[in-house]
Amino acid sequence: MSLASGNANDNNNYIGGFLSYMVDDVYNITLYDNINMMYSLPLSINLLSNSIMSKFNSNLKIKTSYKPLDVVYNVFDDSDDKDSLDSQNLMNVIIEMVLVAEIGVMFSLLVSLYGPTLVKEREENITQQLYLNGMKNLNYWIGVICSDLICILLSISLITIFGIITDLSIFYYKGLVFTLVNLILCSISSLLYQYIINYFIEKYEKASTFSSIFNPVLTLILCMVSVYAILKEDSPKNKWSFYLLYILPMIFFAPSAIPTILFKIAYITAFKMYENKYDKFLSSSSYQELLNHREDDDYNRKLNESFKKFSYPSITEFFEKKYHLYYILIILIISIVLYITILFILEKIKYNGKKKYKKMG
């Protein structure tokens, strides 16, 4: 029955059909088969083959055989795995944002312990005694920074172990060095900031109370500001003034750099970078291999781990312009240079004041 006859309609029960056409003097034939009739395809091939033989006046006959598969595999929809990854990544983002906030507040409290020790040394004339014993000013500050930084590095090590155990993306092995470098830079900036603030406080009790209460509270507030800024930075309506939410706190309150940097890394690694990698992962060899274990009880865990390994950003991806991470790092380095300059100026003023006082005496 041909379409040209006008007798083909939805009421007919078809086994199959043929469509033939010529392209560049080459015949092309398309076979249509009824999926509800398993023998329609081999029957169509048999009929077509015999028709071709008959056209060339051949007495040969071609027979086709068809044996269905003994094992029938269930066809699954990979959208289920995609939905599972979506929900898991959303949960990861929420958990990581909370933990990053806790780490940021804890770090600000930790750093606040070192600034007041300088006030204590001045109060007990330890600093003056060191100068009288011949210690140079530069050597004193190098010793202070190095000793405090060593203590903070021990704390960073404990936090890193915690992050690895809890499977935080910011401490994933592919980006661990990058996170540690940022934490060390933030620690140096925060220490210098504490030294400058406590430069103007004369009593240890006041310095200790101020640092232990003011730092964590303000850091917690700026944590929320950082989250808001990170979530809103993709908006096309943002002007340059929007990024002052990053710049001003990091310059005028250095401990805020810690949660800002960590929030940014967590946002990129736990959420943002995954957006364009779902489809690539579902067609990757690692995912195809994982399908062999689809019936395992821990399949979802293996799926999440495999996807995390596949989609975790490289260093070059971290610094893509759309994430503005390099802006934050530049501001962080500038703030360190600024704090060192301020500290140098303060020490110069103090030295000139003592020199003038001795001349008057």
Image (tube, grey):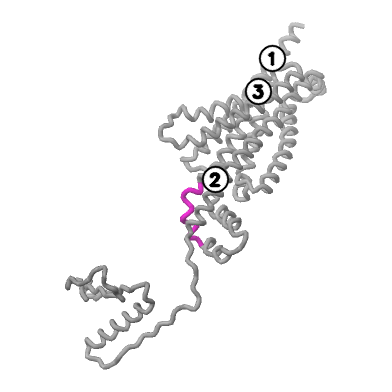
Which element type, helix, strand or loop, lies under badge 3?
Answer: helix
Report the span colored magenta.
Answer: 273-284
Q: Which mark is residue 10?
A: none
| Residue 301 image point, x, y percent | 61, 56
Would you place residue 138 above or below residue 63 in this image? above
Q: Is residue 336 visible?
A: no
Residue at which label 1 appears: 352
How far apart are the two marked residues, 1 and 2, measured between alpha carbons?
A: 58 Å
Residue type indicated by callout 2: Leu
Magenta segment includes 283: yes
Left or right position of 64 against 181: left
Using the image as rendered, state which of residue 333 and residue 5 is in the foreground. 5
Quadrant in which residue 227 is drawn? top right
Instruction: Decide: few, some or many residues near mark 3? Use Cα within 10 Å; few <14, some 14-19, many ≥20.
Output: some
The residue located at (57%, 54%) in the rendering is 304
Q: Is residue 95 visible?
A: yes
| Residue 117 image point, x, y percent | 76, 25
Residue at which label 3 appears: 344
Using the image as rendered, state which of residue 340 and residue 330 is in the foreground. 330
Left or right position of 286 against 52: right
Residue type indicated by callout 3: Phe
Residue type indicated by callout 1: Asn
The residue located at (73%, 28%) in the rendering is 114
Q: Which mark is residue 90?
A: 2
Magenta segment includes 279: yes
